[in-house]
Amino acid sequence: MSTITTAHAGTTLYLGRRLHAAQQPAWPDADVLRAVTSELAAYPPLVMADECDRLRHRLAAVTRGEAFLLQGGDCAETFDGVSAEQVRNKVRTLLQMSAVLTYATSVPVIKVGRIAGQYSKPRSDLVEVRDGVELPVYRGDAVNGLAFTPEARTPDPERLKLMYQASTGTLNLIRAIITGGYTDLRQVHEWNRAFVASSPFGERYERIVREIDNALAFLAACGANPAEFQASDFFTSHEALLLDYEVPLTRVDSRTGLLYDTSGHMIWIGERTRQLDGAHVEFASQVRNPVAVKLGPSTTPGDALALVERLNPNNEPGRLSFIARMGRDRVRDVLPGLVESVKAAGAQVAWICDPMHGNTFKASTAHKTRRFDDILDEVRGFFEVHRSLATHPGGIHVELTGEDVTECLGGGDEVLVDQLHQRYETACDPRLNHRQSLDLAFQVAELYRDRDASVLPRPAPLPAAA
């Protein structure tokens, strides 16, 4: 624990009362930290206030049941991962998932990347021990290095500037991709057709693909060429964990005089930092960005309602989202009470499912991993809860990559335990690979279509991978 007592010069943000800030690094040199945060405070904003407003308005539609959120990206970005190919592959994966979900849900799908800022991670342990050697735990590239050496593992405030530079480069790549014709719906659909043609689940997904084919053919026959086919909004998000980064990048909007965290369009508070009397909740309460809070299985209805009061006192749709991360074994038991209490209070909240973090375990090979079937079952439970309460399943929040990694088990092109070592590349938690991400999108599309059924159908057993 550390304490945050003042905001940085240049903003009117003030985190007073010596609030506890959980999960902060033990920076070794306070003078170096002050110099770094002073530099960050003078840097240009990474995003603009009106972009944050636009996302908040989009999320208001999710809150009303008129849109669906697709949020995804790396568990922890790395500085080495800022390449045109890797960024393009992440964006492509999210675009492909969005195309399927948009058609199946018949509502707009808001695309938000866990990208251009997800360079730090909360950790359960302060230290890591290998062969009797104890060093600080890796907290993400924004804090220290992954290599198990004293030099790499010592927290370095200079890395906060590298985080800003990496985020700038990533945002520039994303904007070039979005404006360069890469998002054309017909091209994205062709990518999905190729995926279905080669997928062991292809026969099951063929119906949706054929329906999209027919819809596009009808529009072409009518001579329609909507501008929306060729353009797409894409927003960024990350966990606002390192307050020594977020506070200096908070700016006063010249239009309104209100505060915005210009490090990303949407920020969230994690399960480990959502203390009502903590600095993270206080910080999020003072900025105008759309904010989210991760809710684990220990969350009570009272906790949820108190967070609503602190973070959305004006009950504004689009301001606050709750991201449930319960685990497949707890989602059906814990989530109903939370959703029911929020609904009874009339609170305007978007409900999002994070089916990743509650389903992590260590395989016999010692790799941290997740089973695709467990991930899907938590999503299914999330939909069942909302169907039973007549509330809107607002979206999914997943850790994924556009690469062909072998980090999560299962999926159409099944990854087996003894294959985990082949391309296990994550810096922290296991991610769905490109094909597993698309498998998930098609199956979520089926769940959304069936959300009004009396009982959500359990799919027939999927064929084994060839």
Image: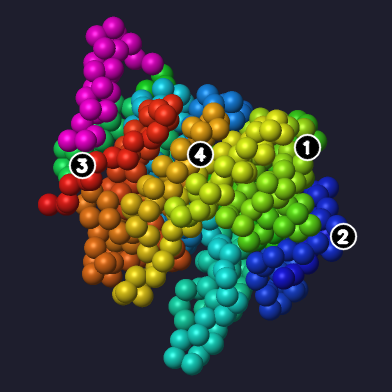
Q: Earlier in the sequence, mark 3 or mark 1?
A: 3
Q: CA distance from mark 3 to mark 2?
A: 56 Å
Please tell me in which quadrant of the rendered image residue 122 appears: bottom right
Which residue does the image show at 50% across and 49% down from the upper left? Answer: 331
Q: CA distance from mark 4 to mark 1?
A: 26 Å
Which residue does the image show at 30% across and 43% down from the upper left? Answer: 439
User: Which residue lies under the disc numbered 2?
Assistant: 17
Query: Is mark 3 in CB contact (under 8 Å) with mark 2?
Result: no
Q: Which mark is residue 372?
A: none
Q: Which mark is residue 313?
A: 1
In the rendering, at what x and y percent does residue 414 appear?
23, 55
Please say if 29 is above or below 358.
below
User: Which residue lies under the disc numbered 3?
Assistant: 201
Query: Is mark 4 in CB contact (under 8 Å) with mark 2?
Result: no
Q: CA distance from mark 1 to mark 2?
A: 21 Å
Residue type marked 2: Arg
Q: Earlier in the sequence, mark 3 or mark 2?
A: 2
User: Which residue lies under the disc numbered 4?
Assistant: 385
Left or right: 37, with 391 as reference point:
right
Q: CA distance from mark 3 to mark 4?
A: 27 Å
Q: Earlier in the sequence, mark 4 or mark 2?
A: 2
Q: Residues within 10 Å of mark 1 (few under 14, many from 20)?
A: few
